[in-house]
Image: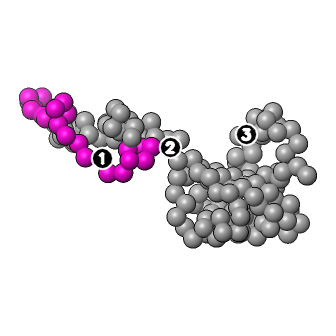
Amino acid sequence: MSDVLFCTAGFLERSQSRLVGLAPDLATVVLVDGETVSDEDIKRITIAFFSSDAWPERVEAFMRVVVGAPKLRWLHTMSAGVDHPVFQMLVDRGTRVTTSSGASSQPIAATVMMYLLALTRNLPRLMRSQAAHEWAMHRWNELRGRRVAVLGMGPIGLEVVRL
């Protein structure tokens, strides 16, 4: 028996050639806007990928299919958070649930650093001054030698500390 992947039309459109290269025998059941997934197709699904294009408009339709898929062995979600009870219900019935935790840690940590620099330099004030064509000297605080508290030492927190 080959696996049957449940995914969105957008994900399949972006990834089909790579999927075929990695798993040529992989069949797909696709969530298409405005269409219903048939009961026969739901019964065939063995794996599912909850991609970012399903959020937030298609969450309900996607999860309805996932919950109704009796052969589902694996659900992967693009997000890190799986604290909604539906995920525990899937785990309880034997479905492996995996996340993309850490996949965006580097760009998010870089954004955190950008905000820290913007705050220490009072960027909003500098932008207002520039818009008003005021070129007065402004003092700011440096990050060097300062202590920063990082709440949460998951992949994002660890990357912020590393930077």
Residue 141 drawn in magenta: yes
The one of 133 and 155 positioned closer to us in this rendering? 155
Q: Is residue 16 above or below residue 74?
A: above
Q: Is residue 20 above or below residue 97?
A: above
Q: Position of residue 120 (x, y in %)?
A: 19, 38
Query: Which residue was labeled with disc 3?
Result: 15
Badge 2: how crowded within 10 Å, few (<14), some, or many (20+)?
some
Task: Tell me the SS state at disc 1.
Answer: loop
Q: From the image, which quarter does the C terminus lie in?
A: top left
| Mark 2 / mark 3, whichever is N-terminal | 3
The one of 141 and 10 positioned closer to us in this rendering? 141
* Amino acid, disc 2: Gly
> Image check: 3 left or right of 53?
right
Badge 1: how crowded within 10 Å, few (<14), some, or many (20+)?
few
Residue mark closest to the camera, 2 vs 3? 2
* Amino acid, disc 3: Ser
Q: Quadrant of residue 22?
A: top right
Query: Which residue was labeled with disc 2?
Result: 102
Task: Tell me the SS state at disc 3.
Answer: helix
Residue 150 image label:
1
Residue at horizontal 78 percent and vertical 39 percent from the top? 19
Q: Position of residue 60 (x, y in %)?
A: 64, 68
* Amino acid, disc 1: Val
What's the magenta region?
131-157
Spatial CA distance of label 2 from label 3 is 21 Å
> Image check: 37 left or right of 89?
right
Task: Tell me the SS state at disc 2.
Answer: loop
Q: How many numbered markers are drawn?
A: 3
Q: Quadrant of residue 156?
A: top left
Residue at horizontal 70 percent and vertical 61 percent from the top? 95
What secondary structure do most residues of the magenta stretch adopt?
loop
Q: Is residue 41 visible?
A: yes
